[in-house]
Amino acid sequence: MASGLGSSGASVVILERGEQLPESWHARDTRSIFIDGYYRPTESWRDTRGREFNPGNYYYVGGNSKFYGAVMIRYRERDFGALEHADGISPAWPIDYRAIEPWYSAAEKLFQVRGAVGQDPTEPFHSTGYSYPPVADEPAIASARERLVKLGLRPFSLPLAIDIEKWLSHGKTPWDAYPDVRTGKLDAETAPLAVALRHPSVSLVTGAKVERLIIERDGRRIVGAEYSKNGERVLVRAKIVVLSAGAVNSAAILLRSSSEAYPEGLANRSGVVGRHFMNHNATAMLSVDPRVTNDSVYQKTIGLNDFYFDDGRGGPPLGNVQLLGRVSAPILKASLPLVPEFALRWLARHSVDWYAMSEDLPDPESRVRVDGKSIVLAWRRTNMTAHRGLIRRMKEVFHAAGYPIVLARAFDKRTPSHQCGTVRFGLDPGTSALDPFCRAHDHPNLFVVDASFMPSSAAVNPSLTVAAQALRVADHIQATGFAA
Ligand SMILES: Cc1cc2nc3c(=O)[nH]c(=O)nc-3n(C[C@H](O)[C@H](O)[C@H](O)COP(=O)(O)OP(=O)(O)OC[C@H]3O[C@@H](n4cnc5c(N)ncnc54)[C@H](O)[C@@H]3O)c2cc1C
């Protein structure tokens, strides 16, 4: 949003709860990241049963993208329409693919995405190609790709926002789930925020935690945002307020901003704020061939959408499969603490590591609530028939590809990496909180622009779609002369 608005000369103040990630040896230390939880937040959320947990949700300049796997992929054209899944319907969006396509291209340019159009049969129309060729498969991964191709599948080069030479020059590690201390990932800090801050009219205040939005006494307009910094409360007044705190926190801020006139929170006449929380159903799969050593460093260069719209046998959609960042013994130890290190080292040496991801469908009872200062996350998983189908199908594929051992382990519920849907956009103010340009139906000068606007989660990574919609909304705000 800020990079899209920067050129207008408008005065933009960004309030960021976190600080900039400091340079540190911890940033490339697997143990610090995966076992010690060095970068995890200090806060706890609660689940439906009231049990506290420490969420894998990151508060730094650049947000969760500082840790992301940098897969910057477009939602498929059919993801914008209604899609029938095994356990229900994925609803249509209020805009179609063509309405957002130019901003997908702009977002790919901004994040310097490396990729190749034409390898993936589900790839939608691109008005412009990628500016950089795809990140190369390492030799072990090239042979894994070859094995899939021999089965008649169509693995494709993942579109990636990573400057691989720069990344590796700072340490021979994967980047997926590793923090980026400005060493080669193109994320929200190093790509769009860097562009935004070149404009003197754009400023960033860190350590500024927004507590609530303030509404005018007898009206619908938002006066500004109240934030706390160093124990003080500060009110920033603005003509236009854009809330972009991530799908869980944006919903929580709107709910916490309740008042006499808005007892259910802001932008919430429809009652949807906090509801329809989605997070992909995701499983790590290790395909193991004891005869072969996987000596790759980063690994994460291949995706597979052969089962995205059907199971390959005429059945319903299953999902996307993509490589994980290279898994090592300490990473395995974090989820398998009882298995001896030598066994994990053997496993890590011979496995190729995959991420299988299926669509989570919107359920009004899957929701974010606030209870005093606490966030309650009641994620109700859906569409597990599809996810189980994907795991089964991939086990068959890996066995046929010559991997005698295939292990699968679901990602746990404490990791809301692909959170979305909690402040959905739509045409009907009775069933959505935002209009198709993410403006609140209830408040003419409030926009909510992060993963919360999505009415469905599709089954590919969300960031490029968040970025494309943000650029689209920024252009809309400029085109309408900042009318609010
Ligand atoms: C390990 C990991 C790997 C991932 N890999 C991928 C991938 O490969 N591809 C992909 O597309 N997606 C990936 N994701 C998901 C991706 O990071 C998110 O979809 C994306 O960052 C969402 O953007 P957002 O703007 O909605 O929210 P966020 O990135 O969460 O940004 C919200 C910002 O608001 C700040 N904030 C929160 N509350 C407040 C407050 N009260 N006051 C002030 N500031 C506040 C936060 O600190 C943060 O900077 C991954 C995520 C993780 C954790």
Image: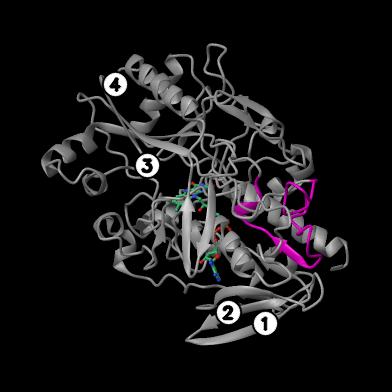
Residue 34 visible to an observer of this rendering: yes
**Mark 4 and mark 3: span between their CA atoms?**
22 Å
Quadrant where the C terminus sits is bottom right
Q: Is residue 264 above or below residue 459?
A: below
**Mark 1 and mark 2: span between their CA atoms?**
8 Å
Sequence order check, earlier mark of 1 and 3 = 1
Q: Nearer the viewer, mark 1 or mark 4?
A: 1
Label 3, on which residue? 411
Label 4, on which residue? 403
Label 2, on which residue? 227
Q: In which quarter of the image is residue 244?
A: bottom right
Q: In which quarter of the image is residue 9?
A: bottom right
Binning the other alpha carbons within 10 Å of mark 4 as few (below 14), some (14 to 19) or many (20 upward) gives: many
Label disc, if present, on residue 236 of the rendered structure:
1
**Mark 2 and mark 4: span between their CA atoms?**
53 Å
| Identity, as a three-letter code, of the amino acid under mark 4 | Tyr
- The structure residue drawn at horizontal position 27% and vertical position 34%, both measured from the top left corner, is 294
Q: In the displayed structure, does residue 261 sit left or right of residue 372?
A: right
Q: In the displayed structure, does residue 39 sit left or right of residue 422?
A: left
Q: Look at the numbered disc 2 and say if its residue's Cβ is closer than 8 Å to ligand 1.
A: yes
Residue 140: x, y in percent? 33, 32
Q: Look at the numbered disc 1 and say if its residue's Cβ is closer than 8 Å to ligand 1.
A: no
Binning the other alpha carbons within 10 Å of mark 1 as few (below 14), some (14 to 19) or many (20 upward) gives: some
Q: In the displayed structure, does residue 410 sit left or right of residue 124?
A: left
Secondary structure of residue under mark 3: loop
Instruction: Point out the stretch of residues depicted in magenta.
Output: 427-454
| Identity, as a three-letter code, of the amino acid under mark 3 | Phe
Quadrant where the N terminus sits is bottom right
Q: Is label 1 in contact with label 3 (beta carbons under 8 Å)? A: no
Q: Is label 2 in contact with label 3 (beta carbons under 8 Å)? A: no
Secondary structure of residue under mark 1: strand
